Every structure is written in C-alpha cells, then in structure tokens.
Image (tube, rainbow, N blue to C red):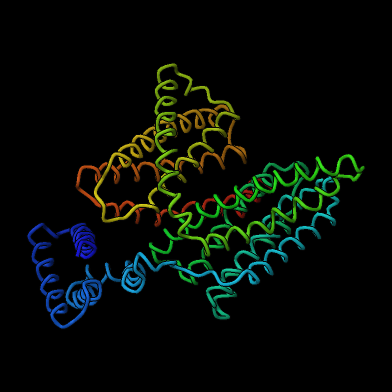
Amino acid sequence: MENMESQIAEWRAYVATAPGVNGHDVDELEDHLRHQIADLNAAGLTADEAFLVAVKRMGDLDSLSREFAREHSGRLWKQLVLRDDDEPTRAAGGWFEPLVFAVAAAVVIQVARLAAGFPDKEPNWLARNATLFVLPFLAGYFAHRRELDTRRWMLAAAPFVLAALVVNLYPWDADSATEALVALHLPVVLWFAVSYPYMGGTLRSHERRMDFVRFTGEWFIYYVLIALGGGVLMGLTAGILEPTGVDVDRIAEWVLPAGAAGAVIVAAWLVESKQRVVENMAPVLTMLFTPLFAVMLAGAAVVYAVTGLGEAFDRDLLSVFDALLLVVLALVLYGMSARDPSTSPDWMDRIQLVAVVSALVLDVMVLGSMIARIGDLGFSPNRTAALGLNLVLLVNLAGAALLSARFLTGRSTLHRLERWQTAYLPVFALWAATVVVILPPLFAFT
C-alpha cells in the first residue's frame, strides 16, 4: 500500500507541473484515479497491477496521464513484475559475449600500436584515432545485446564511420591546435554515439537518457577499479620479474594498451551484470563528494570574487576550472540518477544547489576573463573551443540552479529538473561534434 501511495504521489506531482492545471484539477484527477484503482482491486488485481492499469485508463481520458505512463512505463513494469526481493533488473548474459568484444578491441589497439611504433614513436594519427579503435566495439556489444535490427545496426555504426572519415581525411598542419582539440573532443562525441545502441535504438526517451547517465557513472567506477587493480598487478609483476632480467617495460607495452581497451567492454559488462551493487554505491558516493565539492566551490567563488583573481585567469587555470565545472556537472547528474523522483527535497538537494550556484559564479568569472583575452588577442582554436564549452555550461548550470530552487521551494518537481538535464545532454554532444567537424576547417586546420 505504501508503494502505491508513492506511485500516486509521483503521478500527482507530474500532472501538477502542467500549465493551466491548478490544485483543484489535480484533486479531481487523483480522485478519479483512486476510484479506478479501487474498482480494479475489487476485481482481484493487486495494488501495483491496479495502479498500472488505472494510469493507462486515465491516459485515454487525459493527455497528461498518457504522457506520464509513456515516460514511466519501463519503471512501472519493473515494479510490477520484479519485486524488491527478487531483482536483479537486467541480466547481462554469460561472459563469453563481452570477452569476444574485449579481445577484438585489444587486438585492434595492438595492431594500431605496432603500426605506429608506439611508444618509440608517437604519431598524431594514433592519438586522433585512439577511441575509434575501442568504442565501436562497445557500441557493437550493446547493439548485439539489445538485438537491434539491421537498420539500427547501420544507424549505430554511422557516427563512427563519419568520425573516421573526418579525422583522417582532413589536411592537418604540423603541430595543429585543431588536431589536438579533435583528439580531446572525439571521445565525447563517440561516447554519446554509444548511447544509441545502449538505449536500444531510441533517443527520445528521457528515462532512457537518464539510464545512460547512470550507466556512465557506474561504468567509470568499474573502469577505475579495474585500472587500479591492473596497476597493482603490473607493479607486483615488475617486482617479481626484475631479478630475472626480463624486460618489464616491453611487457608493459603489450599489456597496458590491450588491458585498457579490453577493460572498456569488461566494465560495461560488469555494470550490466552487477547493476544493483553499484546502484547501492551511487547514493554513498554522491553523499560523500557533493558536500566536499560544494564547500570547495563556494570557498573558491568567494576568494576569487573578493580578491579579484577572477579577472586574471591564465590559460592553465582556465583549463583547471573547466575540468572542475565538468566534474561538478557529472556529480550532480550522477546523484540525480540515483534519486527517486517522487521523494521530497532533502538536505542533499540544498547542498547540490550550493554547488551548482557556486559553479555558476565561477563560470561567469571564467567567461569574463575569456572574453577579455579574446578581445586582446583575438580568436584562436583553443579560445573558441573553451568559450563554446563555457557558454554551454553556463546555460546548463543556470537552468539547473533555477529548477533546483523551484524544487526546493515546492514550485516544481524533481522530474522537471531531470527532464532539463536529459534534454540538454545532446547540446554537449553537438558542441563536441562542432569542435571535431567545423572548427578545424574554420581555422584552416592550423
């Protein structure tokens, strides 16, 4: 019964966000929904079953309920079919399938390394194409797992093919700044390309986008754990083999690239197969790091504003602050993905608002300094890319701060804030793609 009440509360909060709907309207709709549930209970349906069917019936009468049912259908069916005591939610299958994709990625990265003569030589094409040697296999793994049809397979492959053509056919200059920017931004573009097969060949569902945000955070945790374990293993191996005269550096040249590439797929498989383990970690990590980042950001914003240091950001400091803002955004997104949308605001939401507002203040300072530098020195590839990123972050942080404040004051819902963030994710992908495709010819590949 308590679970049904929380579902009704979430449905009510969603309906109440519509323009032109007042509290009396919501009360009438809720009363109608409860009558539907009571009738269905009397007919022998369980509480969860009755809620699910009642929302569907309400959808025939009310467009808001229909939209609610569409957006939340996956979670509602999960609650209906899988109880808390008999999840897991998604089975990742056996280990053979991810092993095949992991080995394939490791082999390709080794062929590329040998062709480049790395680490003795470090040709630019290797850095440009590094993620193209790995992420297509991750996309292929998800396309195979989601059983995409031929058309969706082709759509999933298209961004990788286009990216490979762009980064390898452009006439790069020696020591090209735009080439370095492409090497930094292409992984972002291709990671968003992975979202299409991960989401089963759909892009419009906000809940599936939030699933991908959740997957990204969990994948990162597993990848870091694998990397730390691999580092310890390599260190111990080096200590054991050093007295034998074996060239440990040569072994590392083979093991590290292959391990780093294969771990991309292995980490994804672990997220799929051990999802509930990391889901329990997400609230703990956000509860630990969000207050720390909030204090640090607030302190930095005050210090830089009072001392006037915000007017004198140098190039290296600008890069540090951009990285910090991205980390804060990722932390807020990951924390949001671990929240139940039907819950009321708590102290963590207030701390997140402090972090977002502090990041917004710092971003304004960074933008002011950047615009001043561009006014003095003119546009360059690096300044243009940084300016675009900070403008994209400014809009995102401003929207997040506004919706968070409305949520804390009871004038909006967490679902509205989630929709803002998931709807904004393609903007980051679009800007990264702009840096990869448009910026190089705009600056004559210099």
How many numbered marks are there?
Answer: 0
* Residue 293, picture quadrant: top left
Q: Could you say where residue 259 lies in the image, as x and y percent from the top left? A: 72, 54
Q: Could you say where residue 110 lies in the image, as x and y percent from the top left? A: 79, 58
Front one among 257 and 283: 283
Q: Is residue 61 left or right of residue 325?
A: left
Q: Could you say where residue 6 lies in the image, as x and y percent from the top left? A: 22, 60
Front one among 90 and 143: 90
Position of 250 relative to 208 (above/below): above
Q: Is residue 100 left or right of residue 112?
A: left
Q: Residue extending furthest top?
A: 307
Residue at 76%, 41% (x, y): give it.
175
Position of 347 relative to 333 (above/below): above
Can residue 37 be seen from the camera position used here? Answer: yes
Q: Residue extending furthest bottom?
A: 43
Q: Quadrant of the C terminus?
A: top right
Residue at 21%, 65% (x, y): give it.
4
Q: Residue extending furthest right?
A: 245
Q: Could you say where residue 312 lies in the image, as x and y percent from the top left? A: 52, 22
Q: Quadrant of the N terminus?
A: bottom left
Front one among 395 and 192: 192
Position of 254 relative to 67 (above/below): above
Residue at 48%, 60% (x, y): give it.
275
Residue at 67%, 56% (x, y): give it.
131
